[in-house]
Image (spheres, coloured by chain):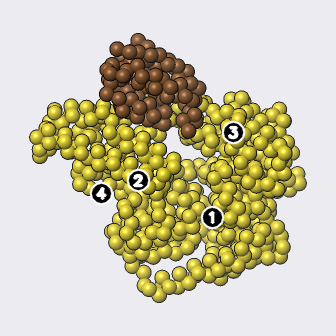
Amino acid sequence: MAEITVVLPPGVGLHARPAALFVGAAAKSSCDVTIGRPGEPGVNAKSILGVMGLGAKAGEEMVVTAEGEGSDELLAGLKEILETPEGGHA
Amino acid sequence: MPDLTTLTGVGVSPGVGAGPVVRVVDSVPEPKQGPGTGSAEEEYAAAAKALEDVAADLEDRGQRAGGEAQEVLSAQAMMARDPDLAVGIKQRTDAGSNAARAAYDAFGATREVLLTLGEYFAARVTDLDDIRNRTVALLLDVPAPGIPELTEPSILVAMDLAPADTALIDKSMVLAFATQEGGPTSHTSILARNLGIPAVVGCPGVRELAPGTYVMVDGSSGKVVIDPAPEMVAELAGRDEKRRAALAAVGNAPGMTSDGHSVPLLANIGGAADVEAALANGAEGVGLFRSELLFLDRQDAPSEDEQYGLYRAVLEGFAGKKVVVRTLDAGADKPLPFLPFGEEPNPAMGVRGLRICMQAPDIMHTQLHALARAAKGLDTELWVMAPMIADVYEALWFREACKKAGLKAKIGTMVEIPAAALRSRHLGQVAEFFSIGSNDLTQYTFAADRQIGSVARLQDAWQPALLDLVAATVAGGQVNSIPTGVCGEAAADPALGCVLVGLGVTTLSMSSGSLPGVRAALAAHTLDECRAAAAAAQDAVDAASAKEAARAALPKLAELGL
């Protein structure tokens, strides 16, 4: 299982718009993907309601895991989405 | 015997519309507990299909709307297709629940989680509820919530309209609005005036009108007439025609009484997007720039650069004209996640308006500094005022804050609290202008919440007590040789606009759509007629007779169909 840690950039945190981008990218993959806080069980990263339900705020550390074919590429892409401040997704 | 053919509410957007009633569906019944007619698998399949249909419909509507609405609607579609939600429904249908109830409960569980996360996510709860209602409506085979597809020009009847209902509204298919609840400052009213659609709000009984009933809505008198005689429709339509002709005749001339007393007519705006409509309606400047719209619905305060960009765009739009900016106005009823002041038992009386900024001076400093930068190099005349000032101490605090930020502007005080109106003589020594926020001043004078329909009778700017407070404010301003404007919806009523001018108010600011009517009313009367109307209204015992007396003293209003 591949795993990365990301610090959310300044902005509004993982609310509807960034969450939708993140979940949209995760859902395209065949991997099992989770996101959560370090040391806590993650939620299904393909569930927008689960991801929004984390209530993750700017500056928080989040752990993303992926299992399956192409998990490393997927995680690299998800990291980029999470680290782009809002307004940067033109 | 009660008159069963006429319902009476508050006319908030003038004009006449007659046509069939279409009801906006505002609720979906709660599904019954227990098993459904099919097997567990069939019930789950039905729920899954309903969710997919809802998602596809949301995406389709998003594509038609485009822009920001599309983003919101496709995020909603993603919620409808959520895999965790599907699991929650499956667990419930497997346990023997019917499809509609399983969906209802699974949404409910998610809803609770989002509600605990605070203000921003609470707004997503509204989106989630909308999806739940659409899904349950499909499964129960009842009408979906919201505005039904309009196939002919119709009268829209609702409990009240939410902004979400109206995003896709087709202006050419709506003859008029009539709502059971709401007041002159509710979303429906402001929307109707902006679109120029006749509207009556706060009208008991309209919800019971059967779909297809032929009614006439008169947005001037506040009457909804059931099955009106053709002659009556013709007469009122004729009056409406006269009104439109009167508005066209006066064009976009500067605000002025018929004997040449100048009353600049200004627009209330929320941002650069409103500039075009304001200028098209002949606004001579901005009397109320609601800067707080930039702060609401977000997790952190906007940066100085972000604020600078927004202010600059507005100030550029009104080059050579006056722009009055109201500094951040939020509070417990419009909470900001980055300024947590906790739950207040009585939000309207809590930490709001300037009081927020006094507790978080950095927020104010950033805003004032952004404004100072935005005004540099432009010939726009910048005026700045703080909301909810109660006494001289607060006015002085605000003046100091403006100086510290290096702001070169006229620094004024909003008069929204009766204490400020009563002591305007002293406030005027500190302020360079007054601006009366009539909506809040009415709320605080009558201890009547703006959002509660059952006290709407008191929430009426024609109340003579409110007129007395306007007169007191003007007097305090005149002693100190400073101007007093009005920037609430009171200024948007052509008759009341004349009365305010008669009381000595120097500028009127309103939503752009209301400017032409007020301009025409002023142009038809002399300053002395306005003064006589003001005196007559102040002498009346209640709001209704004040309005009647003032209108009698302004004879041309009826002639012009205003």
User: Circle 1 sits in a helix, a strand or a loop, which is it?
Assistant: helix
First reached walking from the N terminus: tag 3 or tag 4: 4
Q: Categorize mark 4 by other alpha carbons within 10 Å: few (<14), some (14-19), many (20+).
A: some
Residues tagged by mark 1 and mark 4 found on one chain of the structure: yes
Vertical placement of B447 versus B225: above or below? above
Looking at the rendering, which quadrant does residue B344 occupy? Answer: top right
Q: Residue B511 versus residue B468: which sits nearer the camera? A: B511
Name the residue carrying label 3.
B307
Which is in the foreground here, disc 2 or disc 1?
A: 2
To which chain does the residue with label 1 belong?
Answer: B
Q: Which residue: 80% across, 40% down?
A: B372
First reached walking from the N terminus: tag 2 or tag 3: 2
Quarter of the image with the N terminus of chain B is bottom left
User: Circle 3 sits in a helix, a strand or a loop, which is it?
Assistant: helix
Q: Is residue B200 left or right of residue B480?
A: left
How far apart in space, not on screen, are marks 2 and 3 (Cα)? Answer: 32 Å
Q: Which residue: 68% across, 44% down?
A: B310
Q: What kind of residue is marked 4?
A: Pro
How far apart in space, not on screen, are marks 1 and 4 (Cα)? Answer: 33 Å
Residues tagged by mark 3 and mark 1 found on one chain of the structure: yes
Q: What kind of residue is marked 1?
A: Gly
User: Circle 4 sits in a helix, a strand or a loop, which is it?
Assistant: loop
Q: Colour of chain A?
A: brown
How far apart in space, not on screen, are marks 3 and 4 (Cα)? Answer: 43 Å
Q: Colour of chain B?
A: yellow
Name the residue carrying label 1.
B513
Vertical placement of B140 versus B231: above or below? above
Q: Is residue B6 visible?
A: no
